[in-house]
Amino acid sequence: MEDENRRPLLISAVVLGVVVVLIGGFLLFRDRGAVVSVTSIPNDLTLSVDGRPVDANGEIKVKSGTHTLTGERRGFQTYSTTFRAGSGDALKVKMYLYANSAEGREWAKNNPEQEHELEAEAGRQYDEGQRRLVQKYPIIKRLPYIGPGFEVNRTTSKSDPKNPEAISVTVDTWTAKGKELALEWIREDGTDPATLDIIYTTSSTK
Protein backbone atom coordinates (compact mmCIF):
# COMPACT_ATOMS: atom_id res chain seq x y z
CA MET A 1 0.00 0.00 0.00
CA GLU A 2 2.87 2.32 0.88
CA ASP A 3 4.55 1.58 -2.48
CA GLU A 4 1.33 2.44 -4.30
CA ASN A 5 1.19 5.81 -2.52
CA ARG A 6 4.77 6.57 -3.48
CA ARG A 7 4.22 5.79 -7.15
CA PRO A 8 2.36 9.05 -8.03
CA LEU A 9 5.04 11.06 -6.23
CA LEU A 10 7.79 9.34 -8.22
CA ILE A 11 5.94 9.93 -11.49
CA SER A 12 5.46 13.60 -10.60
CA ALA A 13 9.15 13.97 -9.76
CA VAL A 14 10.20 12.37 -13.06
CA VAL A 15 7.82 14.56 -15.06
CA LEU A 16 9.07 17.68 -13.24
CA GLY A 17 12.67 16.68 -13.94
CA VAL A 18 11.96 16.24 -17.64
CA VAL A 19 10.24 19.64 -17.80
CA VAL A 20 13.18 21.31 -16.05
CA VAL A 21 15.64 19.69 -18.48
CA LEU A 22 13.58 20.75 -21.49
CA ILE A 23 13.27 24.34 -20.29
CA GLY A 24 16.96 24.46 -19.39
CA GLY A 25 17.92 23.12 -22.80
CA PHE A 26 15.71 25.67 -24.52
CA LEU A 27 17.22 28.54 -22.56
CA LEU A 28 20.73 27.24 -23.14
CA PHE A 29 20.52 26.63 -26.87
CA ARG A 30 18.00 29.23 -28.03
CA ASP A 31 19.29 31.95 -30.35
CA ARG A 32 19.75 35.10 -28.30
CA GLY A 33 20.73 37.04 -31.40
CA ALA A 34 23.39 39.73 -31.45
CA VAL A 35 23.63 43.45 -30.82
CA VAL A 36 25.46 45.53 -33.43
CA SER A 37 26.59 49.02 -32.46
CA VAL A 38 26.85 51.17 -35.59
CA THR A 39 28.62 54.50 -36.07
CA SER A 40 27.88 56.22 -39.37
CA ILE A 41 29.44 59.12 -41.26
CA PRO A 42 27.66 61.06 -42.64
CA ASN A 43 25.45 60.67 -39.59
CA ASP A 44 22.30 61.18 -41.67
CA LEU A 45 22.97 58.47 -44.24
CA THR A 46 20.38 55.79 -45.02
CA LEU A 47 21.30 52.46 -43.43
CA SER A 48 19.80 49.03 -43.96
CA VAL A 49 20.45 45.49 -42.74
CA ASP A 50 19.57 42.81 -45.27
CA GLY A 51 17.42 45.42 -47.02
CA ARG A 52 15.58 46.43 -43.83
CA PRO A 53 15.92 50.14 -42.89
CA VAL A 54 17.51 50.77 -39.49
CA ASP A 55 18.82 53.77 -37.57
CA ALA A 56 22.11 55.10 -38.92
CA ASN A 57 23.64 55.29 -35.44
CA GLY A 58 23.07 53.23 -32.33
CA GLU A 59 22.35 49.59 -31.58
CA ILE A 60 20.75 47.11 -33.97
CA LYS A 61 19.49 43.69 -32.93
CA VAL A 62 19.98 40.88 -35.44
CA LYS A 63 19.57 37.11 -35.46
CA SER A 64 22.58 34.85 -35.52
CA GLY A 65 23.99 34.35 -38.99
CA THR A 66 25.47 36.35 -41.86
CA HIS A 67 24.10 39.81 -42.58
CA THR A 68 24.75 42.61 -45.07
CA LEU A 69 24.89 46.21 -43.89
CA THR A 70 24.46 48.90 -46.57
CA GLY A 71 24.91 52.65 -46.25
CA GLU A 72 23.99 55.21 -48.87
CA ARG A 73 23.55 58.96 -49.22
CA ARG A 74 23.32 61.28 -52.18
CA GLY A 75 26.74 62.70 -53.00
CA PHE A 76 28.60 59.73 -51.48
CA GLN A 77 29.74 56.30 -52.56
CA THR A 78 27.35 53.55 -51.52
CA TYR A 79 29.07 50.94 -49.37
CA SER A 80 28.10 47.43 -48.24
CA THR A 81 29.82 45.17 -45.76
CA THR A 82 29.00 41.62 -44.69
CA PHE A 83 29.40 40.44 -41.12
CA ARG A 84 28.65 37.28 -39.17
CA ALA A 85 26.91 37.43 -35.82
CA GLY A 86 26.77 34.68 -33.22
CA SER A 87 24.27 34.21 -30.43
CA GLY A 88 25.02 36.71 -27.67
CA ASP A 89 27.64 38.63 -29.69
CA ALA A 90 28.19 42.36 -29.24
CA LEU A 91 29.68 43.80 -32.43
CA LYS A 92 30.88 47.23 -33.49
CA VAL A 93 30.66 48.38 -37.11
CA LYS A 94 31.73 51.63 -38.73
CA MET A 95 29.76 52.71 -41.80
CA TYR A 96 31.84 55.52 -43.30
CA LEU A 97 31.01 56.82 -46.77
CA TYR A 98 33.32 58.92 -48.93
CA ALA A 99 32.23 61.86 -51.08
CA ASN A 100 32.14 61.29 -54.83
CA SER A 101 30.47 64.50 -56.04
CA ALA A 102 30.32 68.25 -55.47
CA GLU A 103 27.38 67.77 -53.10
CA GLY A 104 29.35 65.34 -50.97
CA ARG A 105 32.40 67.58 -50.89
CA GLU A 106 30.22 70.51 -49.84
CA TRP A 107 28.84 68.41 -46.99
CA ALA A 108 32.40 67.59 -45.91
CA LYS A 109 33.28 71.29 -45.94
CA ASN A 110 30.32 72.08 -43.70
CA ASN A 111 30.99 69.17 -41.32
CA PRO A 112 34.73 69.37 -40.57
CA GLU A 113 34.64 67.15 -37.47
CA GLN A 114 33.05 64.24 -39.28
CA GLU A 115 35.31 64.81 -42.29
CA HIS A 116 38.36 64.72 -40.01
CA GLU A 117 37.21 61.36 -38.59
CA LEU A 118 36.71 60.06 -42.14
CA GLU A 119 40.28 61.01 -43.04
CA ALA A 120 41.61 59.42 -39.85
CA GLU A 121 39.70 56.21 -40.57
CA ALA A 122 41.03 56.14 -44.14
CA GLY A 123 44.55 56.40 -42.71
CA ARG A 124 43.89 53.57 -40.24
CA GLN A 125 42.49 51.36 -43.00
CA TYR A 126 45.49 52.09 -45.23
CA ASP A 127 47.98 51.26 -42.45
CA GLU A 128 46.10 48.06 -41.60
CA GLY A 129 46.01 47.08 -45.27
CA GLN A 130 49.76 47.65 -45.59
CA ARG A 131 50.37 45.56 -42.47
CA ARG A 132 48.41 42.66 -43.95
CA LEU A 133 50.22 43.05 -47.28
CA VAL A 134 53.65 42.87 -45.63
CA GLN A 135 52.53 39.87 -43.59
CA LYS A 136 51.36 38.13 -46.77
CA TYR A 137 54.27 39.32 -48.94
CA PRO A 138 57.39 39.86 -46.76
CA ILE A 139 59.34 40.73 -49.91
CA ILE A 140 57.58 44.12 -49.95
CA LYS A 141 59.95 45.33 -47.23
CA ARG A 142 62.86 44.91 -49.68
CA LEU A 143 61.26 46.60 -52.67
CA PRO A 144 62.14 48.26 -54.94
CA TYR A 145 65.57 46.70 -55.50
CA ILE A 146 68.06 47.15 -58.33
CA GLY A 147 70.73 44.51 -58.73
CA PRO A 148 73.31 43.59 -61.37
CA GLY A 149 71.26 43.31 -64.52
CA PHE A 150 67.81 43.35 -62.93
CA GLU A 151 65.22 45.38 -61.03
CA VAL A 152 62.53 43.91 -58.76
CA ASN A 153 59.44 45.91 -57.82
CA ARG A 154 55.74 45.52 -57.15
CA THR A 155 52.56 46.41 -59.01
CA THR A 156 48.81 45.75 -59.00
CA SER A 157 48.03 42.04 -59.11
CA LYS A 158 47.75 40.79 -62.68
CA SER A 159 45.73 37.73 -61.68
CA ASP A 160 43.47 39.52 -59.18
CA PRO A 161 43.49 43.25 -60.11
CA LYS A 162 40.42 44.18 -58.05
CA ASN A 163 41.91 42.85 -54.83
CA PRO A 164 43.76 45.65 -52.98
CA GLU A 165 45.52 43.06 -50.85
CA ALA A 166 47.09 41.18 -53.73
CA ILE A 167 50.18 42.18 -55.70
CA SER A 168 52.33 41.07 -58.59
CA VAL A 169 56.12 41.24 -58.40
CA THR A 170 57.81 42.70 -61.46
CA VAL A 171 61.23 41.49 -62.59
CA ASP A 172 62.82 43.61 -65.30
CA THR A 173 66.10 42.32 -66.72
CA TRP A 174 68.65 43.71 -69.19
CA THR A 175 71.47 41.17 -69.08
CA ALA A 176 71.68 37.46 -69.91
CA LYS A 177 71.93 36.46 -66.24
CA GLY A 178 69.49 39.10 -64.96
CA LYS A 179 66.57 36.72 -64.41
CA GLU A 180 68.71 34.10 -62.67
CA LEU A 181 70.25 36.70 -60.36
CA ALA A 182 66.85 38.23 -59.62
CA LEU A 183 65.44 34.85 -58.56
CA GLU A 184 68.47 34.26 -56.34
CA TRP A 185 67.89 37.63 -54.70
CA ILE A 186 64.21 36.84 -54.10
CA ARG A 187 65.19 33.58 -52.37
CA GLU A 188 67.65 35.30 -50.00
CA ASP A 189 65.06 35.81 -47.22
CA GLY A 190 63.44 32.42 -47.74
CA THR A 191 60.80 33.57 -50.22
CA ASP A 192 59.88 30.92 -52.79
CA PRO A 193 59.43 32.60 -56.22
CA ALA A 194 56.80 29.97 -57.03
CA THR A 195 54.51 31.54 -54.41
CA LEU A 196 54.63 34.95 -56.13
CA ASP A 197 52.75 36.26 -59.13
CA ILE A 198 55.83 37.39 -61.10
CA ILE A 199 55.71 39.51 -64.26
CA TYR A 200 58.91 39.30 -66.30
CA THR A 201 59.98 42.02 -68.71
CA THR A 202 63.19 42.66 -70.63
CA SER A 203 64.80 46.03 -71.31
CA SER A 204 67.56 46.69 -73.81
CA THR A 205 69.52 48.85 -71.35
CA LYS A 206 69.06 50.41 -67.93
Image (spheres, rainbow, N blue to C red):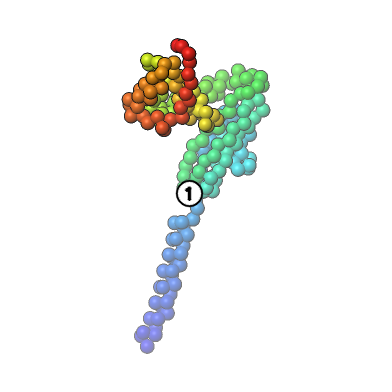
The kind of secondary structure element at disc 1 is loop
Disc 1 crowd, CA 10 A, few/some/many (<14, 14-19, 20+): some
Q: How many marks?
A: 1
Residue positioned 50% across, 28% down in the render: 157
Please state if 192 lies on the left or on the right of 86 as rendered: left
Residue 12, by quadrant, is bottom left
Residue 42, by quadrant, is top right
Label 1 is placed on what type of residue? Answer: Ser
Residue positioned 47% across, 23% down in the render: 200
Label 1, on which residue?
A: 87
Residue positioned 47% across, 59% down in the render: 26
At which x and y percent is residue 205? 46, 11
Please state if 107 lies on the left or on the right of 87 as rendered: right
Q: Residue furthest front?
A: 176
At which x and y percent is residue 166? 48, 30
Q: Looking at the figure, which quarter contains the C terminus?
A: top left
